Image: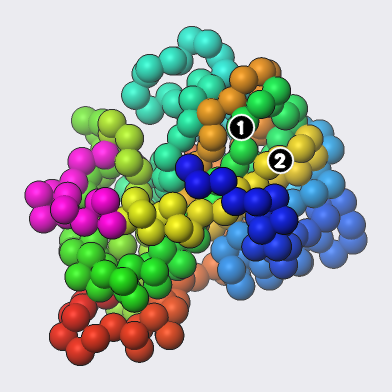
Amino acid sequence: MRRLPPQQTQAALAHHCVNASLPGATDRITAGLRDSGLVVLTGVASRTDVLALAARIMTVAAHRDSDSDGLTTLRDTRRHAGRAGFAGLGNGGLEPHTERSGIPVPPRLMLLVCGQAAESGGDSILVDGRAVHADLLTRSPTSVRVLSQRCTAYFGGGDGHPSQVFTVYDDHRVAVRLRLDGLARFSPIVQPHLPVLRTALQRQQVRLPLLPGQGYVLDNSRWLHARTAFTGDRVCWRALGQPRFVLPEGFVPDAAARRAVPVGGSGQW
Ligand SMILES: [Fe+2]
């Protein structure tokens, strides 16, 4: 992963930041999610605070790895190394992905908060799907068209889900769904465009080192998340769920990038 200078990372995400412990935080978080699909959080001091914040903004959905309260404790269990679909419970790096990409309806919101920082590494990497879409529209509109063709990807194991990287809705909003690990398969027409996609992901990624009490909440239909490899006893708490407020799916494509597409260069985007 390309390492951005710390000041560049902070500058890129500064306008997304909300202190969750201050009055009015819930309204600022919901407004931020509607506006840009991402809010960077400070002031979430404990697991209890994570649970309380999650309950204010989403209906928490328990799943395979979650604890009895619905939160998932992400740490290196040393029992999941090399197991497909369990990479989040190891200490390796993770490529940009949609959370739970292999189920028909992935959770719309993902809240992640650092409880204990790693000794080294373990930075969060965030990638705005709207920025990737605009990047590709400008540089490789054919890739956008191919990556938007229906059922050209399959995410998950035997009980996974057929999809496409970009889903274009009737109102022209676009949602992203992606994974690039061993549980992703792509049709032969998509495969030549994966290197272009990976390069765009690298260009648009933002690195977010997290200290205890810091985290983020993102719209899982717009933003991809990743992680660098780490050493030490890094602990993060994660909540997944559906928003308790109106949140349109995906994003409105970047208008300037749409205008930059050469005539006949894209067709559907
Ligand atoms: Fe994840």
Please give the residue where the numbered disc 1 appears in the rendered image.
122
**Which image quadrant is residue 13 in?**
bottom right
Mark-to-mark CA distance, 2 and 1: 8 Å
Please give the residue where the numbered disc 2 appears in the rendered image.
210
Residue type, numbered disc 2: Leu
Location of residue 100 with respect to 24 vertically, above or below: above
Residue type, numbered disc 1: Gly
Magenta span = 184-196
The residue at the far top in this view is: 79
Coloration of the structure image: rainbow
Q: Going from the N terminus, do you reach mark 2 or mark 1 first?
A: 1
Q: Residue at x 21, y 56 (%)?
A: 193
Q: Residue at x 84, y 38 (%)?
A: 45
**Place of residue 88 in the rendered image (x, y in percent of width and height, measured from the top left):** 50, 28
- For the residue pair 2 and 201, the one nearer the viewer reads as 2
Pointers 2 and 1 in contact (C-beta within 8 Å): yes
Q: Is residue 64 left or right of residue 153?
A: right
Q: Residue at x 72, y 56 (%)?
A: 7
